[in-house]
């Protein structure tokens, strides 16, 4: 028997003043384990009977919901319509929050419902989604946040691969990072959006918590720290302060770095807690990003156009004619038609020196009359115009 159990047994027979003090201070139940468990279980029994009864009702209700989703699936099949409808899912999630009487927080209920819709959707068809692999990346987390877990994830090794896989119908959707709250735009995604025929049909915002990971949690023999260049940049000051002499090596993804650290004690990785669990690494230091509110926004790309939801945004790429006041003229239609701009980024037009493409997000859906009027005028004013799609806003 473990010494701690023997000590507890002895104390149960002859209460000693030190234990009594500790018990008082920490409010530990002084009853021996089995007796305490029995007493607690007796008091819990009627509550558990009620939980079991509610679980039975929930099982029945969830299966009723799944049967309705199957019926929806048959109608969609008849009219050759897509299974995944992001605007409908956004509507369902909004209703969940509106109808929630508590005490469960709405964002927890919504997370549950994402999984409910994911399994209902899978009764229609398991949607194929391409993400930046290997297992354990933030992109995989973003994919699960958007689609739930009942999907067929296809792991790709680069952002380019994700675009190509979806373009070639190897997956119906892809999830790619587009901007980070510390480092700004993900340039490769921005550049690929310019030429792809794919549309944006959703977005996911994810809190990013980077941890320093090593196979045994010991940094004494570590000669290299590996991570995606974005993660290295997001932890730049922390690394400079704590490990200024260890070489930093960029790799394709943080999960790939974690995979490398799994097989090499001289390598430490910067990755998520999911990657740590996936590759059996120990956390040397948690939360090493320079900004505690580090977030990355991901977009969902696909061939599908999204219908309207309660709260949509639209993304465009524009270029101005090369003349004075062109940018002002370009954006004037947004103000004129009461459309609010949410994001404005520029990327150099690579073929032409000192000319730019402008990436603009604004509130509203392309099916709204004021948006259509603004877009018609924007298109007239632009030297280049591409609409990337309208899709539900998520926080
Ligand atoms: O309403 C639909 O179109 C459904 O297929 C049902 C459902 C759901 O479970 O609520 C499932 C998948 C769709 O992406 C949207 C919603």
Image (spheres, rainbow, N blue to C red):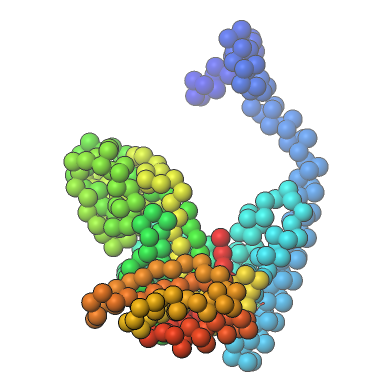
Which residue occupies the extreme bottom position in the image? 79
Total number of numbered labels? 0
Q: Position of residue 305 (x, y in %)?
A: 54, 83
Point 58% across, 19% down: residue = 8
Point 73% across, 33% down: residue = 40
Picture quarter with the C terminus: bottom right
Q: Is residue 215 left or right of residue 314?
A: left
Point 55% across, 22% down: residue = 5
Q: Nearer the viewer, residue 228 or 116?
A: 228
Q: Is residue 241 visible?
A: yes
Q: Nearer the viewer, residue 393 or 79?
A: 393
Q: Is residue 273 left or right of residue 352?
A: right
Q: Position of residue 154 (x, y in %)?
A: 41, 72
The quarter of the picture showing ligand 1? bottom right
> Does residue 359 lie above or below 72 as drawn?
above
Q: Nearer the viewer, residue 133 or 381?
A: 381
Which residue occupies the extreme top position in the image? 17
Q: Is residue 259 visible?
A: no
Q: Position of residue 121 (x, y in %)?
A: 60, 74
Q: Position of residue 181 (x, y in %)?
A: 42, 56
Name which quarter of the figure residue 47 lies in.
top right
Q: Is residue 20 left or right of residue 278?
A: right
Name which quarter of the figure residue 139 lies in.
bottom left
Point 32% across, 60% down: residue = 253
């Amino acid at each position: 028997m473990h010494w701690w159990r023997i000590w507890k047994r002895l104390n149960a027979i002859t209460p000693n003043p030190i234990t009594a003090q500790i018990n008082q201070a920490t409010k530990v139940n002084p009853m021996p384990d089995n007796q305490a468990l029995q007493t607690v279980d007796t008091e819990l029994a009627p509550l558990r009977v009620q939980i079991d009864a509610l679980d039975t009702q929930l099982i029945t209700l969830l299966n009723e919901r799944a049967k309705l989703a199957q019926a929806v699936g048959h109608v969609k099949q008849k009219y050759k319509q897509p299974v995944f409808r992001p605007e409908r899912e956004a509507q369902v999630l909004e209703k969940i929050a509106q109808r929630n009487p508590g005490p469960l927080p709405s964002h927890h209920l919504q997370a549950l419902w994402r999984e409910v819709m994911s399994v209902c959707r899978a009764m229609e068809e398991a949607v194929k989604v391409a993400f930046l692999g290997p297992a354990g990346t933030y992109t995989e987390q973003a994919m699960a946040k958007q689609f739930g877990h009942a999907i067929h994830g296809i792991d790709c090794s680069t952002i380019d691969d994700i675009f190509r896989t979806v373009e070639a119908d190897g997956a119906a959707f892809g999830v790619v990072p587009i901007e980070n709250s510390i480092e700004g735009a993900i340039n490769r995604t921005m550049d690929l959006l310019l030429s792809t025929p794919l549309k944006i049909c959703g977005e996911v915002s994810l809190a990013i918590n980077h941890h320093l990971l090593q196979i045994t949690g010991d940094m004494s023999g570590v000669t290299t720290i590996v991570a995606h260049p974005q993660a290295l940049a997001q932890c730049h000051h922390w690394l400079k302060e704590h490990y200024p002499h260890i070489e930093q090596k960029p790799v394709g993804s943080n999960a790939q770095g974690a995979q490398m650290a799994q097989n090499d004690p001289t390598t430490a990785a910067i990755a998520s807690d999911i990657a740590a669990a996936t590759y059996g690494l120990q956390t040397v230091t948690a939360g090493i990003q320079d900004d505690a509110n580090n977030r990355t926004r991901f977009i969902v790309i696909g061939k599908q156009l999204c219908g309207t939801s309660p709260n949509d945004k639209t993304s465009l790429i524009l270029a101005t004619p090369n003349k004075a006041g062109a940018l002002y003229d370009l954006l004037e239609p947004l103000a004129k038609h009461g459309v609010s701009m949410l994001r404005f980024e520029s990327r150099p037009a690579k073929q032409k020196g000192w000319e730019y493409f402008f990436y603009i997000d604004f509130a509203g859906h392309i099916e709204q009359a004021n948006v259509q009027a603004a877009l018609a005028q924007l298109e007239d004013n632009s030297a280049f115009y591409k609409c990337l799609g309208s899709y539900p806003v998520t926080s």
